[in-house]
Image: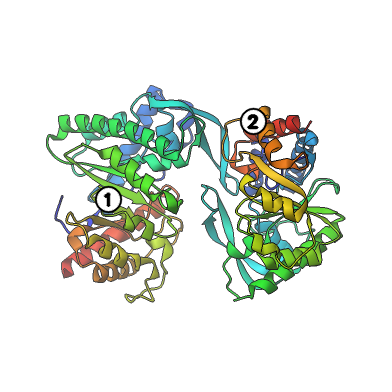
Amino acid sequence: MGIVTGIYPKSENLRKVIGRWQRGVSGSGELDEALENETKRYEDISNGVSINCDPLFNWFDIFRPLLTAISGFSVGPLRRFEETNTFYREPSLESLPVLNSSFDTLLEASESLPLPLFRSNKNSSACFPGPETFFSMSNNTGNLSKPEFINSLVKAYSEILSKTGRNSAVIMERVPPGADSIKAINKHLSGKKIFLYATGPLEESSFRGTDQKLHSIIAKPEFAGIATAHSQIPGFELVDAHNTRMESPKEILDKFAKLSHGNGIIAPTDYLDFLPSVIADRKVALLSEVVS
Amino acid sequence: MSQKNLILQEIGSFRKPEYLSSRFHKIIGTPEFNEKASKATVEIMDLFERAGLENRGVGGEMFRWEMYEHLAYNIKGIEFKGMVRSFDNRYYRKGSVTKQISTLQSAHEKELSFLLQNFQGKLKVPITGPYTMMDWSFNEHYRDRRELANAFADIIRDEIILLQSIWKKHRGNEVLEVQIDEPATTTHPSEMDIVTESVNRSIQGISGIESSIHVCYSSDYGYLFDQLPDLKVDGYNLEFANRDLLERGKDAASRPGFLDVGRFRDANEHVNEKRFLGLGVTDIHIDTVESVDLIKDRIEFSLKQFERPDLIRINPDCGLRTRSQDVGFQKLKNMADAVHSIRKEL
């Protein structure tokens, strides 16, 4: 199986439409149509990947739409996104997160593209920032307790899935998901297919005290053991999302064979928004080829 | 090195006039481009002079569009495969290094030649540094990031040698000032040794120049200051105003953005060849024009931390191209007025 998740790079056409919308030259109708067409195009090219996720074309960064959909946050200053040359708006955590009743119908949200959160069909997975990542990349202005924040946020994620009729979600952690996160996922999302996608390290200690295996943990090859031990379907990050160099199918399959014992998911090392769209399309095609 | 106190200097880019920006990519490489870029340079050099700058850089980089692209387009071995998002709907061209890199043509020769033929007085040539060029490129060819940074360093070193030869024809033994722009510095704290090695390699063996490094929006200047004994540049031109408050005051609580001046002083104490500090006193990301009094507070607080006005230069945080020409001019003018006022009291 293969997976591509997170924010997918936008085509030149969509970038231009967004630019016109931002300048007030065109209205929401043209933007909505362009987002719809782009989402359909993505669904076509990613069809062979097997685990389909919403490409989040209307997300400027992995937090901002949630800052309007969930109360308790405000939008802060620009911050560098980890060790990249990409920036995000730092969330300011003011109170414990609670899902807004009109969470998916907000249109002209501040410094964001129009919602809904997810545009692709209900069979595709939602994608959320991991609760540890959310906490660590935010400014905790409300001095919130981390375990309480994580619990409330994952509960809000669960409600979003229920209200949008989705059965699965990818939770992307860029820092090690701690025991609080694993506990919250098990508590609030136990009936859903959850893909815990760790682009950073994993720690065995996070899983102590729980016998419950997650549906899937996707990890760097060096953490394959932890992913295999604590999930039903381990995944391995074998396609470089930070380099335009194209891997060969053989290169990926050889690595997969060493890690997987025949069972598992092949994934990129991150979401593909750090690449030019034409290269991202090629990486998706490569993944489809490898999966087939 | 000049001993004048609080030298007023530009840091790099300035907003291009519409007649140049709207046609830039359509005419680059043509006589029309040279004509328009030259005309704009004359205008911005005049604007800088009226604002009171003593070192006018290269006149706001009218010959350049963007710091990475400008150098990368003049290097063989780099391919552009598309745009990469930086934030929201803003994108930049990130090149892919697909084979061994080498100079295609000088990126700065025309600009410097024009300036030297038409202007007297202090100039400073900004050149994008090897570590940033490496960090902002996809590496498809070199073994690792260090090897690629050093390959860029070799290209930059050749470029500086070429610029110095042009400089000498016009200015004789006067020192050429080169500012190595390294905004990517400190984004990977574990790679500070690569920053130091590659920047040093860029200027290795070149005498008769004054070198500085420009860094902005670092999450922690401590990583940079730790390198001070080993990093062989003469000065550090840094952003401070962006991390400061807009209210007046000369105490530490009022000037949080300038507390790092003390850390710079501490690092500088341990070296024999003292480095100068370029103090960013106006924020280039906001339209608010800081008052003369606020800028004076910032400078005077910094002077209390580092009592060497001969080793402090005054500049904007970064290039002012993000602001309108009117706002940019007023920010520079207030900066100059603040310095003139403080000099009287020194």
Q: Nearer the viewer, residue A13 or B240?
A: B240
Give the chain letter at badge 1: B
- Residue B154 image point, x, y percent: 32, 32
Q: In this view, does B25 lie to the left or right of B102?
A: right
**Residue furthest left as drawn:** B173
Give the chain letter at badge 2: A
Q: Which of B326 and A186 is in front in this view?
A: A186
> Which residue is located at x 70 percent, y 34 percent?
A284
Q: How crowded is mark 1: few (under 14 residues within 10 Å), some or many (20 or more)?
A: few
Quadrant of the image containing the N terminus of chain A: top right
- Residue A242 image point, x, y percent: 57, 40
Rendered position, B44 above or below A65: above
Q: Are marks 2 and 1 in contact (CB under 8 Å)?
A: no
Task: Give the Cα separation between the discs numbered 2 and 1.
Answer: 41 Å
- Amino acid type at mark 1: Asp
Name the residue carrying label 2. A251
- Residue A256 image point, x, y percent: 69, 37
Q: Is residue B161 visible?
A: yes
Q: In this view, does B290 lie to the left or right of A108?
A: left
> Which residue is located at x 41 percent, y 66 percent?
B244
> Which residue is located at x 85 percent, y 54 percent?
A167
Label 2 or label 1, whichever lies nearer to me, is 2
Name the residue carrying label 1. B230
Question: SS at mark 2?
Answer: helix
> Which colour style is shown?
rainbow
